Image (cartoon, rainbow, N blue to C red):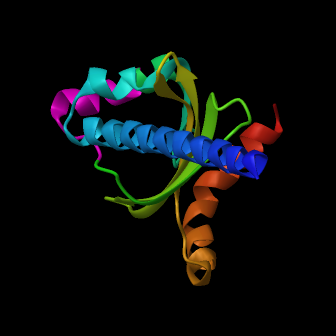
Amino acid sequence: MKKSILFLLVIASFANAQNAEKDKINQTLDTWHKAAADVKFDAYFNVMTEDAIYIGTDATENWIKPDFKAWAKPYFDKGTTWNFIALERNIFFDKSGKMAWFDELLNTQMKICRGSGVLVKVGKEWKIQHYVLSMTIPNDEVDAIVKIKAPIEDILIAKLQKK
């Protein structure tokens, strides 16, 4: 009986610790999105690791942090940044508890987008190491969207296939 109670206490303790870490990750991601909306350049980029990768909605947007900062700086300087608000988010952990991955649906100026990424624990803080932003496309509209994309992306496909 004592072993069963001890086992249940260990499980409950682990679940509480994981929920606390999920809360920290939610706060990190919400703070990150808010920093962009509030045009806070340093606060936005300080949430990312130094080796972070940001993949945007355009096929050519695969940035290491310094390149993403250079791309984003004029938008922050003009005060014309983006405002992403999480509608839902799922968070998962590796066995060590020092790495997490997530997916989220976002309300954006592009309507619903999907974000996904990887966070790593640096000291007591969670930092974004990899982020992917994708536009969602209703299945019934895929053919119409492909017609719009094809002239631009056929050129890019040919260029990438030559590499």
Residue 122 position, x and y percent, is 53, 18
Depth check: give the residue in front, 162 or 68.
68
Q: Is residue 97 visible?
A: yes
Residue 71 image position (x, y, % from top left)? 39, 27
Residue depicted at x 45% and y 26% = 68
42 to the left or right of 24: left
Asked whether, in this view, residue 30 is left or right of residue 22, the answer is: left
Return the x and y of residue 24 as percentages of the image width and height. Answer: 43, 37
Q: Quadrant of the C terminus?
A: top right
Residue at the spot 58% in from the left edge and 42% down from the top edge: 13
- Above-or-below relation of 28 to 113: above
* Relative side of 109 to 11, left or right: left
- 47 or 17, which lies in front? 17
Q: Furthest residue to the right?
A: 162
Residue placed farthest to the front in the image?
A: 1
Find out whether residue 75 is within the magenta segment.
yes
Which residues make up the magenta segment? 70-82
Q: Position of residue 77 (x, y in %)?
A: 20, 26
Q: Is residue 130 magenta?
A: no
- Report the residue at 54% width, 70% height from top: 137
Q: Main SS of the magenta segment?
A: helix
- Image mark count: 0
For the residue pair 124 and 5, the one nearer the viewer reads as 5
Give the vertical position of 2 relative to 131 (above or below). Answer: below
Q: Nearer the viewer, residue 31 or 133?
A: 31
Where on the picture, by quarter, is residue 32? top left
Q: Is residue 52 visible?
A: no
The residue that appears at 31% across and 38% down in the rendered structure is 31
